[in-house]
Each structure stands twice: as structure tokens, then as C-alpha cells.
Image: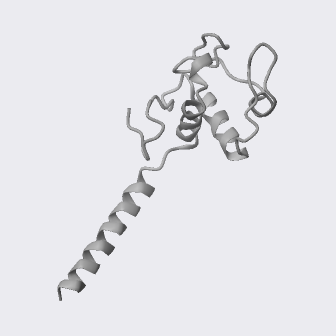
Amino acid sequence: MNRTLKRFGLAAGAALLFTATTASALTAAGEGRRVFLRENCYGCHGGHAGGGMGPNLRGGADDVGEAVRQGREGGMPAFPTLTSTDIRNLEAYFGSLRTPAEPTFTHWWEAVPTH
């Protein structure tokens, strides 16, 4: 009987974890923000893509895929290992800037960042 209760507890816990994770999944813009932070884009473009050493992206970003894959003259390095999904998510993030849908979390490593 004790073994049955342990199995039930493990199964119930796994089901709750799965539900919580899938219910709180990030949007494409959120995943793009995660890529922006993970790849240290903020080092040049600022914490919220407002510019710095690199250009301000809050007014829009053209040719994201080409810029990310090949880099740009003037210091933009290439990121050839980013996936097509990463690039689409970056485009979604840049498209969300200056809108209520803009994600602003700073902890990219959290499964579902909240701040």
C-alpha cells in the first residue's frame, strides 16, 4: 500500500509540473527576449534594446535573420548557430517592443521568467 501511495504521489506531482510548465509557456516574443539575453545582445543594444554601443532596436529591426547570421560591419558579430526558431522569436521580440506585450524579464535561465 505504501508503494502505491508513493507512485500516485509521483504521478500527481509530475502531472502538476507538466500543467504548470505548459500553462505558463512564454510567447514567441518572450522566447525572443530569452535569446536576446542569453546571447548577450544587451551588451551592445542595451537591456531593453534601446541602444548603446549598438543601435536602438526599439524603433524596429530590419533583416534580423541576415544581421544575426552574417553580422554587420561596425562590430555586429555573427551568430551562425542560432536556429530559425531563435531568429523568428527575436523578430517577435523586436516587434513587441514599445507595446503592452513587450516582455521585460531579466532572468533568461528561469524556466518561466517573471521579472
Q: Identify which residue is drawn at 73% across, 45% down.
A: 84
Query: 42 or 30: which is nearer to us?
Result: 42
Residue 42 location in percent, x, y? 57, 22
Q: Is residue 20 left or right of residue 58?
A: left
Q: Quadrant of residue 6?
A: bottom left
Residue 104 location in percent, x, y? 46, 28
Residue 32 location in percent, x, y? 59, 37
Residue at the far top: name it: 52
Residue at the far bottom: name it: 1
**Which quadrant is home to the N terminus?**
bottom left
Residue at the far left: name it: 2
Q: Identify which residue is drawn at 58% across, 42% down.
A: 28
Q: Is residue 77 left or right of residue 101?
A: right
Query: 22 or 68: which is nearer to us?
Result: 68
Q: Identify which residue is drawn at 76% across, 29% down.
A: 78
Q: In the image, is residue 94 above or below residue 73?
A: below
Residue 50 location in percent, x, y? 57, 15
**Which quadrant is home to the C terminus?**
top left
Q: How are the colours assigned in the image?
A: one colour
Query: 94 or 44: which is nearer to us?
Result: 44
Query: 4 or 94: which is nearer to us?
Result: 4
Q: How many marks?
A: 0
